[in-house]
Image (spheres, grey):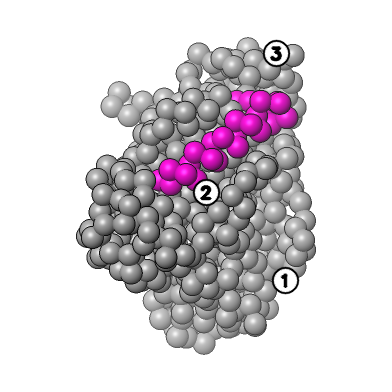
Amino acid sequence: MRLSRRDILKTGMMSAALPFARVLPASAAPRDALVAVSAQTINSLDLHRTGTNRASYAIAVNCYDRLLTFGSKTLADGSLSYDFTKLEPELAESWEVSPDGLTVTFRLRPNATFQDGSPVTSADVKWSFDRAVSVGGFATTQMKAGGFSRPDQFSAPDDMTFVVTLDRASKLSLPDLAVPVPFIINSTLAKSHATEADPWAMEYLHQNTIGSGAFKVTRWDQGQQVVYERFDGWVGGPLPAMRRVVLREVPATATQRALLERGDVQIAFDLPDKDASELAEKLTVYSTPVENCINCLCMNFSFEPFQDANVRKAVAWAVPYEAIFQTAAYGRGLPLWGGEAEITDTAWPRKTPYSTDLAKARELMAQSNYPEGFETTLSIATDLLWMEPAAILVQEAMAQIGIRCTIDKIPGANWRTASLVDKRLPFHFENFGGWLNTPDYYFFWAYQDGHLFNSSNYRNEEIETLTNETLDMAMDDPDYAPKIKRMFEIVLDELPRIPLYQPALNVAVNGAGGYEFWFHRMLDARSLTGGEA
């Protein structure tokens, strides 16, 4: 039996032999359904669950509503992108901020319903917010960035009104409500599956979507696929053109490319730079630099040699930046080396003053406590394909200044724990991207002591103070720019992480339109159409 794309969409299944089978062209398939492929693995349907990986955030984006969303803009190349400067209603119909900035009152859309037909009320919003600030881990820290930390900050005075009370006014509070984390859950249904041991119904939401969003998950075969079906009662935005979207996990990039080029699938999402570069000669490929995201080389301050400032600076001057950018990124994204030493603005990411200068690197090593060099491991994640070619180049460069590196390959499933949770890797790569597009928000996650993406175990008291001061501060406050510039000066001198380049998110399409880039780097199925844009 041969399966056509129509069969795949109808059954939500794909034969293991599909990449090698002849299938019907895309034109023969329904125009309100499409298939996307990615190497990413979705490991939970609940973003709040401990251990949920980044790929799984797509479920919150597509199957749940938030009170607010971001608007859209057209980039210079004609592609679509979210717009951080524009906040728009999603589940909220309107909102009002008090003059002191401490109270935000939301009015909900009166016709919003969950996918089981029950009405969305402010009690559902409060329960969902209470859950997000209480479950711990990533979700709770993300809420805290916007000033949301306790259930007593949220109230539901009537069915259609939801009120947030802040301890302090913050520029990040409203934008933080438009990120994937504060999604609205059918609290009545969730509570019916809660237990004393699981008061937030984590186990039930791990396997089920119970939101009011544009799609619902009708099938999830872990490690293989997720099937979205459109929720025709969605009122949070324009009804999606696609009735069904299948997200297939296809680990082999060569297979993804073959499927896409034949028209068996319409989207290949998050392609490696090499494949994006080659496919761009044949198909439409979007390569969008990821805002507030940096691919870095990190040095762990818990490892004695990297406590030496001269060693860290020697490493920064020895890095072969251009070779990494061309070999690992295929020139896609934006370079972050060779900038001016004087800091005159608050642009971030920004070019550092470092470039490749082995003579200067050797001089700094001679001045360090390790003039004869030392041995270390250089760790990479096996599923982040840019890291291995970058590691080979760094290994070669470090050998020239006496730092002898053994490349340590860590499976993708274990990478987050090793690098971000345990923070046990002496020398490693990292690629954090901040969801809220301000430099202080990046510092909150990547440079403050104990925070998840501070994989270098870095602590600087001035950075702690300045980050806390600027996180809430309005960007037009006269004190903001001087404080941010000082933060740049400190970290570019102390170098817990060496910026390499700003990566691009690569998406190739064949028979699909409406693709829009989002800061969370997930495929938003809501805007997709069945024809080339």
Residue 53, horizontal then vertical, whole percent: 41, 49
The amino acid marked with disc number 1 is Glu
Residue 507, horizontal then vertical, whole percent: 59, 66
Q: Is residue 328 left or right of residue 237?
A: left
Q: Nearer the viewer, residue 61 or 158?
A: 61
- Which quadrant, please, contains the N terminus? bottom left
Residue 174, quarter of picture: top right
Name the residue beneath numbered marker 1: 532
Q: In the rendered structure, which disc, 3 or 1, sits on the residue that comes first in sequence?
A: 3
Q: Which mark is residue 433?
A: 2
Q: Which mark is residue 325?
A: none
Q: Which SS does the magenta portion mostly show?
A: helix
The amino acid marked with disc number 3 is Asp
Gap in angstroms between the C-alphas marked 2 and 3: 31 Å
Which residues are drawn in magenta? 472-496
Q: Which mark is residue 100?
A: 3
